[in-house]
């Protein structure tokens, strides 16, 4: 399979961003204070998460990411901006607001096993004034940059309000810019007539109200036909975990691209990688079956690593 060149693409990524913080150590005893393990910390690491991980994936795949989001004006937000700069990703369109809290997910690991995770965040929708600033920044980007594809990465953390989503889609439709969406439940049906819609299996099943059999093309196709009646997507890509990827295309054709069995260390971040590869390949008009094969390879490379990690072009060879 050839590895494609995406270096000529400008990608606008819009969505919720976060910092993923990891504490790695060993458990050798139980606390005398309570029946809980004592983790002796050996190392710490901060990584870009959410839409920022998508931007990092886009950069590592050779394209140019333009990230639009909003964080808090807080310690985590300052760290987040520093991490973006260290990766060579522009912070120009990451707005900071004193009334928001930057999402921080902290995970503690005993060797390669996660012991606990705790989150510090604000999941309420941005208020009207903050929403206005985001829309103004979006229009500024569209007026000054050549955007080849838009990725909407929704984590239900409040950046993507229903009105903001509507403004993005109206502009993209008017100017014929393809849009790829990785949805979450709250706005699931706000994403109408999307060029490439990428829920995971659970989100897909929840959206139509019954369990889908990931190994049955008939079950998957039936669900896809029902979902298309609800949100009129053009092309659907459903990640099925170890069962691969299901595709339902604009022309009505459908197929499963199976994934090779791997020993997954951690699945976090795999969805970010899949939407990144899929959006780039879609914009380059690569056949969907080959796109899904590339996505499977990228997701496998990420799942072999502990924690959120991007994929690079060399990982797809």
Image (cartoon, grey):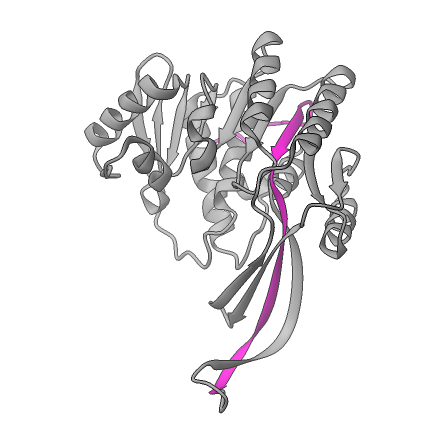
Q: Eyeballing the image, is 72 above or below 163?
A: below
Where is residue 121? Give x, y as percent.
60, 52
Q: Residue at x 78, y 50 (%)?
A: 82
Count the numbered circles shown: 0
Prevailing SS of the magenta stretch: strand
Q: Which residues are magenta?
A: 1-30
Q: Residue at x 76, y 21 (%)?
A: 140
Quadrant housing residue 21? bottom right
Q: Residue at x 53, y 27 (%)?
A: 162
Where is residue 61? Give x, y as percent.
62, 36
- Residue 298 in sight from this viewpoint: yes
Using the image as rendered, state which of residue 256 and residue 44 is in the foreground: 44
**Magenta residue check for 12:** yes
**Magenta residue check for 154:** no
Q: Eyeballing the image, is 44 above or below 36?
A: above
Using the image as rendered, state which of residue 229 and residue 316 is in the foreground: 229
Using the image as rendered, state which of residue 277 and residue 232 is in the foreground: 232
Q: Is residue 154 left or right of residue 219?
A: right
Q: Residue at x 34, y 39 (%)?
A: 201
Where is residue 129? Give x, y as percent.
71, 31
């Amino acid at each position: 399979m050839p590895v494609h060149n995406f270096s000529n693409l400008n990608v606008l990524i819009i969505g919720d961003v976060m910092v993923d913080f990891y504490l790695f150590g060993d458990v050798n005893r139980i606390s005398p204070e309570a029946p809980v393990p004592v983790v002796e910390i050996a190392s710490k690491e901060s990584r870009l998460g959410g839409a920022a991980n998508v931007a990092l994936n886009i950069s590592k795949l050779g394209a140019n990411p333009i990230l639009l989001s909003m964080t808090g004006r807080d310690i985590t937000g300052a760290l987040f901006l520093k991490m973006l700069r260290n990766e060579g990703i522009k912070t120009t369109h990451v707005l900071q607001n004193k009334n928001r809290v930057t999402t921080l997910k902290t995970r503690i690991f005993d060797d390669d096993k996660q012991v606990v995770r705790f989150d510090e965040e604000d999941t309420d929708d941005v208020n009207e004034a903050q929403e206005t600033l985001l829309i103004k920044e979006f229009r500024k980007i569209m007026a000054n940059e050549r955007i080849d594809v838009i990725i909407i990465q929704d984590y239900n953390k409040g950046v993507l309000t229903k009105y903001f989503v509507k403004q993005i889609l109206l502009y993209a439709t008017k100017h014929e810019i393809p849009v790829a969406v990785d949805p979450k439940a709250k706005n699931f049906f706000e994403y109408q007539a999307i060029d490439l819609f990428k829920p995971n299996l659970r989100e897909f099943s929840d959206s139509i109200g019954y369990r889908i059999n990931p190994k049955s093309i008939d079950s998957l196709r039936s669900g896809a036909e029902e979902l298309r009646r609800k949100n009129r997507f053009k092309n659907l890509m459903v990640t099925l975990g170890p069962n691969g990827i299901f595709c339902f295309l604009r022309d009505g054709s459908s197929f499963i691209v199976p994934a090779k069995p791997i020993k997954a260390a951690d699945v976090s971040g795999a969805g970010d990688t899949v939407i990144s590869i899929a959006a780039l390949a879609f914009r380059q008009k690569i056949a969907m079956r080959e796109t899904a094969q590339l996505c499977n390879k990228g997701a496998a490379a990420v799942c072999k690593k502990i924690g959120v990690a991007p994929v690079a072009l060399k990982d797809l060879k």
